[in-house]
Image: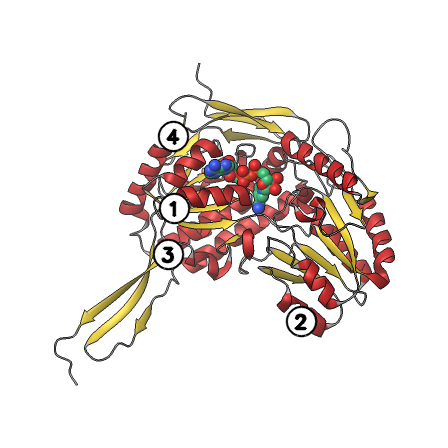
Amino acid sequence: SQAPLRVPITLPNGFTYEQPTGLFINGEFVASKQKKTFDVINPSNEEKITTVYKAMEDDVDEAVAAAKKAFETKWSIVEPEVRAKALFNLADLVEKHQETLAAIESMDNGKSLFCARGDVALVSKYLRSCGGWADKIYGNVIDTGKNHFTYSIKEPLGVCGQIIPWNFPLLMWSWKIGPALATGNTVVLKPAETTPLSALFASQLCQEAGIPAGVVNILPGSGRVVGERLSAHPDVKKIAFTGSTATGRHIMKVAADTVKKVTLELGGKSPNIVFADADLDKAVKNIAFGIFYNSGEVCCAGSRIYIQDTVYEEVLQKLKDYTESLKVGDPFDEEVFQGAQTSDKQLHKILDYVDVAKSEGARLVTGGARHGSKGYFVKPTVFADVKEDMRIVKEEVFGPIVTVSKFSTVDEVIAMANDSQYGLAAGIHTNDINKAVDVSKRVKAGTVWINTYNNFHQNVPFGGFGQSGIGREMGEAALSNYTQTKSVRIAIDKPIR
Ligand SMILES: NC(=O)c1ccc[n+]([C@@H]2O[C@H](COP(=O)([O-])OP(=O)(O)OC[C@H]3O[C@@H](n4cnc5c(N)ncnc54)[C@H](O)[C@@H]3O)[C@@H](O)[C@H]2O)c1
């Protein structure tokens, strides 16, 4: 018997809603052709939430064909104002359903409701911002002399394949579809295997928003099947990916065969620097927020803390106390700051890194163990007195584990901060504006936060230096990832003068 395409789900907060469980192709939820399914697990109690259809290569081909048709016959040729209005409507609908979406996200990913609500708020702001850009895609007129009239315009690319991770499932859905749709592209998006629910729920709002069938298609499925097929498909003109650097590197190679445009938002090992002249209490809150927010499952997490030697022990003690005051547990508990890790795989990856750090000789200050026995919870963990060549300092853990190192001079901390293959973000805590600006110029990172951390805005570009990625999300910069320039020269046979 066939699995249903919608199921009623009672959320942990007691609220019931209808969850679509099919593939979203051409405006409809459908079963996968081969009728394959997979289970979605709630990471905070390890119980099955529901079963979702799993896309295979033939489903990808169908979704790409639908997206291609929608691109050619509808979305790329409508007036830009129509695209703007649809994105405004979608932003309004996300707002209308914000509590349901936040609860779905907490249940599916394990993140605290506090974090999920922050995600959903940014989703609607960002979609609205993209709507605002839709009718402001300008070209140029180029002065090439009296015998020609020359201009350039920006055109959409076509069908975009979008592959997103599990740490911010709904936010990444919006960061991907927003700029693609604003500029007239259509999309086939693959959510991560472990967290498909919010993207499926939100995509059903597209029709009500006035986005035609086929413009947005969602294919839950594996990276190896759906992700590979999207990256190789000749009718997919661009791949936008967020996830690990290893997978990003692989996607680039696969996409090279058809010379697709590729944008990548990858991993990080971002430094967070505390100078002795900072407001130390505020700095401690920021560095804790920088690593423990979203259970540490943040690409730009400030996972390497550098404290100036004269305040090292004092800040470390404050960090220990503050970390131990953070409430960990049930994501639906309004007091909880840190929920569950997203999967059994991540839980064990993180616990393995605790063992690695201990065996390398790092000093465990707090945490370093599982929290509770059911659900994938990890205690917020601080390791001090690390050496810069330790694996725990070099490798991305993607969990609530931070290392603390000591420095004495600006030059020394710049060298330590920049000693990484990554370059996603950096934090600087100081009350000296000259030092703040100087250090911000010298750190190699796509985003620098001064006296704050993990602080996003829908109009501020975000993306990586080095092996942290290619291209930028959000702001005007995100739009240029989704257009190509066409130059037009008109010969003027008889110039008037
Ligand atoms: N930068 C980020 O935002 C981010 C997000 C998630 C994970 N990570 C890092 O990656 C580590 C591993 O997590 P993961 O295995 O889920 O990440 P991943 O990069 O493998 O997965 C991210 C997305 O890519 C897809 N994918 C996997 N293999 C693919 C392939 N061959 N072709 C196309 N798509 C493919 C996945 O299905 C998922 O949708 C984490 O521990 C963390 O360090 C980083």
Q: Earlier in the sequence, mark 1 or mark 3?
A: 1
Coordinates of residue 56 in the picture (x, y in percent): 41, 28
Say few, some or many: other residues with alpha carbon within 10 Å of mark 4 (under 14 / 14 to 19 / 20 or more): some
The residue pinned by badge 1 equals 256
Q: In the drawing, does residue 134 fall left or right of residue 115?
A: left
Q: Is residue 11 above or below residue 382?
A: above
Residue at the far top: name it. 1
The residue pinned by badge 4 equals 57
Q: Earlier in the sequence, mark 4 or mark 1?
A: 4
Say few, some or many: other residues with alpha carbon within 10 Å of mark 3 (under 14 / 14 to 19 / 20 or more): many
Who's the residue at 29% across and 41% down the image? 69
| Any part of residue 166 in sight | no
Q: Marks 4 and 3: which is nearer the front?
A: 4
Q: In the drawing, does residue 161 fall left or right of residue 378?
A: left
State how far apart marks 1 and 3 are (Cα).
Answer: 19 Å
Residue at the far left: name it. 494
Could you tell me how many numbered marks the image carries? 4
Query: Badges 4 and 1: C-beta atoms under 8 Å apart?
Result: no
State how far apart marks 4 and 3 are (Cα).
Answer: 27 Å
